[in-house]
Amino acid sequence: MANTRRSSRQLLTKSLETDGTRGVTIDPQPNPVSETPVEDSEPEVRTYARNKRNRAGRFSDADNLPEQLSRQLNQKPAILPDIEEFEYKTKANKVPRQKQTIQTHMSREKEVLSPVSAVDPPANWKEVLEGIRKMRSSEDAPVDSMGCEKAGSFLPPKERRFAVLVSSLLSSQTKDEVTHGKSQVAGAIQRLSQAGLLVPDAVVKANETTLSNIIYPVGFYSRKAQYLKKVAEICLEKYEGDIPGSLEGLLSLPGIGPKMAHLVMNVGWNDVQGICVDTHVHRICNRLGWVSKPGSNRKTSTPEETRVSLQTWLPKDEWVAINPLLVGFGQTICTPLRPHCEDCRVSNCCPSAFKETAVSTSKTKKSIPMKGS
């Protein structure tokens, strides 16, 4: 078999032995499959010199090389970064997926949008709302007994406001049963109350690990334990143990977004400044076609966008009642996955009716017949 490659040491030796008057001929565009040693010499010698040039004494007679070859040996080649360096930079810049999820969620929770111009309400919204009220009156939902407004109902007004604030903070991305308990199983709020941790001064004295263990398994429990301590510190330092009395003050607290702030303003201070929109209200309003992005027919992307759009046409005397009404409807009938459109009394008015009930064929498991059957 013909030689198509030569070691860099052999090529370098041959170059040194070349008559000085003749020099070394180097093809600027070497042919990788050529059998001619001179044409194959450039990349081989350069690669070898790059890897070994820092070893002392390796090329003691490098000054005797022809000028063109010396320039190529000393030239820093354009190469990809070392794989270890690349991996290190990637790891250094990469945010863990769980942390990304937490950061993304919390940033969305804090998003506040400016109000937009009023629009005409949907033609059948009163009929739909009345139909949902009739369905809700015939069946209880978890929100009816375990909502945030139920937290601390036995406490004095000041302490109750803090309990409602804590309940709102913990309820985000968490089922009501986990936050408020179900039957004989105590929820996170009950466990905090039993431990005497529904007052800000006690929360400040507790360590984050204790708080985290008590509120587990609420969503993002470790991060919420940090927020809980910070909120308690702010309430003690700025509000004498009470909570902020304005929407702006509540939104300045860590972990508190528009949904929670509007709920706390309503329940804690009896001050209605906006609609409390959670994932249920957001989902149902989009299914009914009640909300859209400003200046378009596209669905809203976040609960905050839904709140702004809904407030452009829904009468203010409905702003408080709409939350528990739609939340309970979303917990029992208009569920996130496979809603019970067959049991819904307003399905004839819903543009999304019976469009989300089919199971995706890609997720359906196919049975494989056994041999001999």
Image: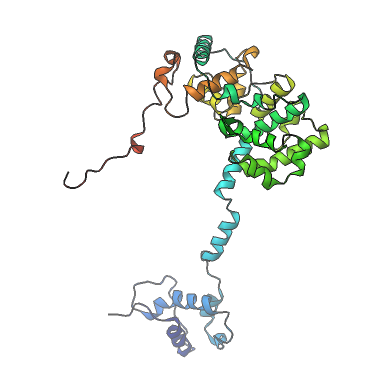
Residue 34 to residue 15: above or below = above
Q: Position of residue 155 (x, y in %)?
A: 74, 26
Determine if residue 68 is in view. no
Q: Quadrant of residue 100?
A: top right
Residue 287 appears left or right of 303? left
Q: Position of residue 140 (x, y in %)?
A: 52, 19
Compare residues 112 and 102 and report the one nearer the observer. Answer: 102
Residue 238 appears left or right of 74? right
Q: Position of residue 145 (x, y in %)?
A: 59, 23
**Colouring mode (rainbow / by chain / secondary structure / one colour):** rainbow
Compare residues 373 and 263 and report the one nearer the observer. Answer: 373
Determine if residue 335 is in view. yes
Compare residues 52 and 317 and report the one nearer the observer. Answer: 317
Tally of marks: 0
Residue 22 to residue 206: above or below = below
Q: Quadrant of residue 86?
A: bottom right
Quadrant location of the N terminus in the rendered image: bottom left
Residue 100 to residue 82: above or below = above
Seen at 43% across and 16% down, the residue is 347
Q: Position of residue 20 (x, y in %)?
A: 49, 89
Given the current orientation, which residue lies at the most extreme front position? 184
Residue 101 appears left or right of 110? left
Compare residues 372 and 83 and report the one nearer the observer. Answer: 372
Q: Quadrant of residue 373?
A: top left
